[in-house]
Amino acid sequence: MIKKGSQIVCESLLREGCNVVFGIPGGAILPLYQALPEYPELRHILTRHEQGASLAADGYARVTGKPGVAFATSGPGATNLVTGIASAQMDSVPLVIVTGQVNSWTIGSDAFQETDITGITLPITKHNFLVMDASEIATSIKEAFYIANSGRPGPVLVDIPRDVFMQEVEYEEPGELNLPGYSPNFSGHSGQIRKAANLINKSEKPVIVAGHGVIISKAYDELKALAEKAQIPVITTLLGISCFPEDHVLWTGWPGMHGMAYSSFAIEEADLIIALGMRFDDRITGNPSKFALNSKKIHIDVDPSEIGKNIAVDVPIVGDVKEVLSRMNNHVVDATHPSWLKRIDVLKEDHPSLDIPETSKLLARQVVRDISDETKGDATIVTGVGQHQMWAAQHYRFKKPCTFLTSGGSGTMGYEVPAAMGAQVADPESTVWSIAGDGGFQMTLCELATIAENKLPVKFAILNNGFLGMVRQWQEIFFDSSYVSTAYTGNPDFVRLAEAYGIKGIRVTDKTQVKTAIAEAMDHDGPVLVDFIVEQEENVYPMIPSGMTVFDMIEEPVSEKVTT
Amino acid sequence: MKSSEKHTITALVEDRAGVLNRISSMFRRRGYNISSLAVGKSESPGLSRMTFVVDGDAKTVEMVVKNLHKLVEVIKVSDISEENAVSRELALIRVKCDVASRSEIMQIVDIFRAKIVDVSQDTLIVEVTGNEDKVNSLVDLLGSFGVFEVMRTGTVAMSRGTSFEQDKPVSNPRILENAS
Ligand SMILES: Cc1ncc(C[n+]2csc(CCOP(=O)(O)OP(=O)(O)O)c2C)c(N)n1
Ligand SMILES: [Mg+2]
């Protein structure tokens, strides 16, 4: 059958199970958009900025486990996607991005809106394609989906010139994939798996550190089985949060720069670290040469290039976490580790990182705690980057897997609005709370229009401290409170702003109003924005300064604890 | 572990636009040092072979190999530093030459089994093939006569004997077919 390139794109997307696309049209990609009405099953959500499209696709992908799809036109449309693509690459989120390119015969001539987007995204994609003939579209898109969501997931970009969308070719379904250089499936070496189990069986003070890989491979049951069988405390990474129920007795928080003190100390004191689908990021290790020197390390990851990258390990296993755990658990013997678990309890008592000081002031932490209580730990939480992000991770008690969406590796401010939108599109019935910073929110707030237009009932909690709070905190601690360029004195009236978009707005200035406001937001059928005017100079503790060790940890000073 | 040494890595890659860019971008981004790089067609249509000489300790080289593997268009990577391998480089050296020095230069060229491929009034072009050390020593020796220009291809390398059979990627029958 003869089909146009644009039709082949749509049919290829549908064949891969894609039914939502986020994007904005423009000259080079227009022929693709003009084909959309023929494919009503392909829902297009018109964002207000392409960054919104790529970050919404990220939120959508994390919730569904399918690649998120975004469209943009050539030049500025494509470059606006870049922040979202880089974030997805850092956090192993599968995306398939289709960009329009200038006509094939003008490529290289600096034509209007020509940008070398495959060149630009080369180091921030898992792979990318420039498709110069419509007969290659079907195969390229099939490969893009496969590459994006197999092995360690990541973003794949497909750049298609305008004329190729319009080119008519004999359309054939793509055949078997032929990617001789890509074999992402490692099943885990049996000998190594047995070695790892032996180490676990011999260990007296084991800890599990569970990362994003546990969520990506949905290894929740296997993780729980391992933890319970050998009574091993479970620590998660920031991106691993929610992979293990936080009301479980073995849950031991998350470690690192702003993680719970007891989690970091537990890692330091352990004699064995079982690292699952994580990458020993510097926010966790601090100084890598002084990280957890008392322990042997088992590292299970699907990406061989993560093994030994930051930290030397004793037993590396390259494979899918779920598969490896299900086999390894058979070799792990029941254990109880009573004295180690008692030690963990002592650490938790001695370092109560999650205590919130008694005060009449409106603390941001308290808002998170109240949202946690009001939603019973069942909501999907999406954050921006900064203090509010850390408080969300610390004070929300997650009960359901894959319900914490945050830009971990890239630290992309502005994630809180579009990713929340993507998460809500992915699961319209879920309760999505965006815990936002007043800074980050303003980077992507234009998507409020998209949210209103699509009647997405996202609830926003802006923890409005009038500052780029995390940077202010660094200035306070490391630069003698010299607050250079971190005060946001010209913030808009967020309540009226929401109302301008037809979104319900609520302002909270007093501690006593928090719970009612949250309940009111949840009772409302559509999107709601709650502007919490919180303490301006509240700090996130504990804090391990960049590149240091657990022993350099700064815990909350008593003077700050008793502020009333 | 020596802190820094030269390692020879070969790779079989798809011969497509942008592959070299992808590979060099990975080296640049991760801060790995390539001391030489040579690319050319392989025995199979559509596939190229590359030889990298990389400066770094064992861990760096391991990470180079892993990160090369990660690229979709890279089919096979081998670190052949420890293997018994043949490595060769070709160099053209333009050296200053007058009547007085000519015979001495010719003698040196002979000893190195090099060739004089161009002669002009007061320069010669010497062509030499050999491993990197050999080429280095010839360039050094000719230096005393005055070297104007050196052009080197970079090292290409291949392991000796029949170990190549295990080298063939089983995942790609296409290449095996073409090789037979
Ligand atoms: C796009 C981007 N620009 C700059 C930064 C650096 N940065 C990290 S946290 C932060 C402050 C964030 O302010 P806000 O969103 O108000 O959150 P708060 O820390 O106040 O809770 C900044 C500027 C970043 N992470 N991302
Ligand atoms: Mg702020």
Image (spheres, grey):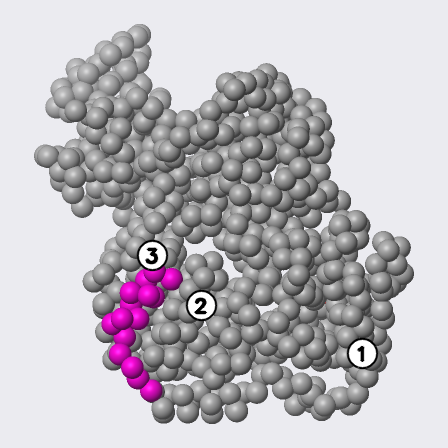
The circle on residue A220 is 2
- Is A524 left or right of A230, judged from the image as shown? right
Judged from the image, the secondary structure of the residue bearing numbered disc 3 is: loop
Q: CA distance from mark 2 to mark 1?
A: 34 Å
Host chain of mark 1: A
Residue B53, by quadrant, is top left
- In this view, the residue in front, A479 or A273, is A273
For the residues tagged 2 and 3, is the chain the same?
yes
- Is B177 left or right of A287, judged from the image as shown? left
Can I make out residue B11 in this image?
no
Packing grade of label 2 (10 A; few <14, some 14-19, many >=20) is many
Can I make out residue A331 in this image?
yes
Magenta residue check for A259: no
Residue A356, position as x, y percentages in the image: 67, 85
Magenta residue check for A323: yes
- In this view, the residue in front, A379 or A270, is A379
For badge 2, the amino acid type reads Tyr
Up/down of B172 relative to A170, above or below: below
Residue at position x 62%, y 75% in the image: A377
Q: Which residue is mark 3?
A: A319
For the residues tagged 3 and 1, is the chain the same?
yes
Residue at position x 58%, y 65% in the image: A403
For badge 3, the amino acid type reads Gly
The circle on residue A516 is 1
Residue A384, position as x, y percentages in the image: 67, 61
Up/down of A536 relative to B22, above or below: below
Q: Point out the stretch of residues depicted in magenta.
A: A322-336
- In this view, the residue in front, A560 or A375, is A375
Q: CA distance from mark 2 to mark 3?
A: 16 Å
Mark positioned earlier in the residue sequence (2 or 3)? 2
